[in-house]
Image: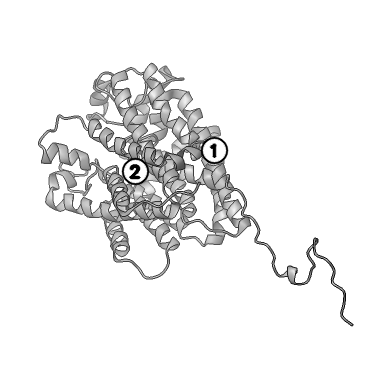
Amino acid sequence: MASAPLSKGEMTLVVIILVIVSGMLPTVIIDIMLGLPSMPKWPMYLVLYAIVGLMLALRSHIVLPLIGRAAVPLLFSLLPLISVVWSVAPGETLTQSLTLLGTTLVGLLLGAAIPPSQALAIAAIASAINPLLDVAAIVALPSVGIHQDGPWVGTWKGLHEQKNSLGALCAMSLLILVVFRRANPGPWPKWLAFGIAANLFLWIAARSTTSWLVGIVVLSVALAPRRWQPRLALWVPLSLISFGTLAALFPDTIIAALETLPALVGKDSTLSNRLPIWVLVQPYIDEAYWLGYGYVAFWSDAYLPRKLFQDTMYFVPTSAHSSFVELRLGFGMVGVVALSFVLGRYVWTMWTAFDALRRWRMTDPLLPLALPFLLYWLFQSLTESIILNRNDLIWVLFVWLSIHTAVLARRPAPRPEPNTAHQLFTRPANSRRLPLRR
């Protein structure tokens, strides 16, 4: 069943929801405006996701027939909730798992309940609004928008935990806006021109080398000619799989590269203290090899080995700064196998969708976002914990695109239009031959 467009009021509500999950706006509201820094933030997010659930319920006649297409990301999102069974901090795992499920519902709303062209417009509008809020935080609330201490003192971070998060969001926003522009040629809307300019400015000003490199790669893929996209959708994932296989076969070479390559792009050999974190948590990964410690449980106050980090690194990290290390800590090898299946299915449905549209000579406004976003998601995952990340726009987009590519991959072929021209020269089978006039 085709998705019905949202009304202007519903569209505005979804834009607000995307803006909220793009940064730390609820934290700023609760901690600074309300003066309640000790108040937990997850109840506010659950109220937000309850609204999303209500919108899904009102469109259940559209969503339910597509649940099968959304099964893989939905089941993957249930893994954190299941990990409550073996979590070393079950209370923390339960509350954060519920907010992750709510985040997944936002992706389900975009992918199953809203037409693709309107969903892309909603994401583009939210991407144009985000830099405005970040600049407001930098100018009006420098204690929030600018790093006040540590090695990055004085650098901009906007409504984010650190400058890398600001740079990553701007790179992704640029990607969304570029795809939207290519899908909607014609006169430039003022808000679109502002969004691209503002995100480009903050992307550069954040001084995040990682987001610069990732942004250049994904924007290059997004701006590639349309006729290249089906080939890129096949060869780029195959190249990544080949690289991963080589990394598994020759790990020493990869480790040596990690120690030398950062200097070429102006980063220190520890990748901003990421490598020491990975080394320190490796014994804990080996200790809980199969199941891990439960979703976000390792970093909870109930378990985190603070003294180990304080004595070695002189600060206590709040995450592993790598999605793949985080996955091992939370779910062990079970998480690795689950992620491999999810990624494999995403690549397969994406390539199938590209191939089907090429054969049918049809276009889709959203599909050109699938491949560059996959590259963005994988590259960012190397140095940031974004896979299965709650209250995060990146996870929303992954769920959304996973559903959309699955819908396109299983879309029936269009019926050929009847060739009415030949009927001018052929007699219908049930017609009676008329006698010729002499």
Residue 160 placement (x, y as % from top left): 24, 43
In what quadrant of the picture does the C terminus appear? bottom right
Q: Which mark is residue 163?
A: none
Q: Residue furthest right?
A: 438
Residue 1 placement (x, y as % from top left): 50, 46
Residue type at numbered disc 1: Gly
Task: Judge left or right: residue 311 versus residue 211.
Answer: left
**Image-quadrant location for residue 93:** top left
Label 2: how many Cα within 10 Å (few below 14, some 14–19, many 20+): many
- Classify mark 1: helix, strand or loop: helix
Q: Answer whether residue 89 is visible to the viewer in this image.
A: no
**Image-quadrant location for residue 322:** top left
Residue 384 placement (x, y as % from top left): 35, 38
Return the disc, 2 or 1, that comes first in the chain's sequence. 1
Q: Residue furthest left?
A: 35
* Residue at the image point whose x is 17% and y is 48% from the top: 154
Q: Which mark is residue 344?
A: 1
Residue 244 placement (x, y as % from top left): 52, 38
In this rendering, the label closer to the viewer, 2 or 1: 2
**Image-quadrant location for residue 307:** top left
For label 2, the residue is: 393
